Amino acid sequence: MSEVKKNASGSKSKAMSEKEEVLENIMEELEQEAKDKEEEKAAESKEEAAKDTEKEAEGSAKEAKKETEEKSEPEAGDAPEEKKKGLFSKKEKKNPLQEKVDELNDRVLRQMAEFENFRNRTDKEKAQQFEMGQSNVLEKLLPIVDNFERGLAAVPEDEKDSAFADGMNKIYKQLTKQLEDLGVKPIEALGKEFDPNLHNAVMQVESSEYESGVVAQELQKGYMFKDTVLRHSMVAVAQ
């Protein structure tokens, strides 16, 4: 019995020692795993710290570069940016009252321009009508001038110094002077080349003095009123 007990106690102690070894092994493995995990975490934390440090260094470098560029740029460089902002910014809504004022102002300016054009056109038409009426009156005076010239030409040589002839001559000169002051001038015809704009040819004559196409005789004197023909010269043209 004593040997059985000894054997039993020995087997128990042996089993206990084996269990203790197994537990120790398990504990060692667990401790090793814990150490490995701690080392991995430490390595990861070191890597993250290194990355954070690198990012901070890059950020500080960028900020320093930006500050340097901003300092180096002239103050006038802000103008294009403001201009760009102004181009792409939303248009402000106009005040309805201001729009109405602008509309009325534009309408007034248009009416003033139309009135100015109307006044200029009216003044021009009045001037043309006045000149037309004036030319009609002057044209009616021309036969009187013709009669004075015919009468003075018909005075005999021995009576040209008489008071009557002298009075007619003075009236004739006064009349022609007034016509000249109004812008009426005689057209030069004799010895000039025929011009249909100034001359009215009624016949052709043979002439040894003038070439063909030249006015040889002036039958009735023509007159100009400023830049227009008041009466054409009635002429005879050399053949």
Image (cartoon, rainbow, N blue to C red):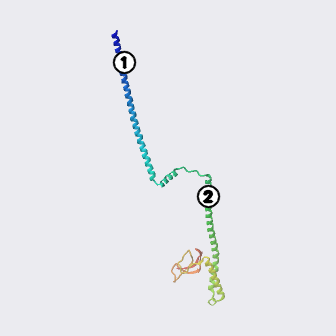
**Amino acid bearing label 1:** Met
**Amino acid bearing label 2:** Asn
Q: Which residue position is annotated with label 1?
A: 16
Q: Residues under labels 1 and 2: Cα distance?
A: 114 Å
Residue 188: image x %, image y %?
Answer: 56, 79
Q: Is residue 26 left or right of residue 160?
A: left
Residue closest to the eye, 175 or 29: 29
Q: Which mark is residue 155?
A: none
Residue closest to the eye, 182 or 98: 98
Q: Quadrant of the N terminus?
A: top left
Residue 13: image x %, image y %?
Answer: 35, 16
Q: Is residue 74 left or right of residue 150?
A: left
Q: Which residue position is annotated with label 2?
A: 105
Residue 3: image x %, image y %?
Answer: 33, 10
> Secondary structure beneath disc 2?
helix
Q: In terms of sequence position, does the residue under pointer 1 or pointer 2 come before the other? A: 1
- The residue sitting at 39% across, 32% down in the picture is 38
Residue closest to the eye, 6 or 100: 6
Q: Quadrant of residue 54?
A: top left
Residue 222 visible at all: no
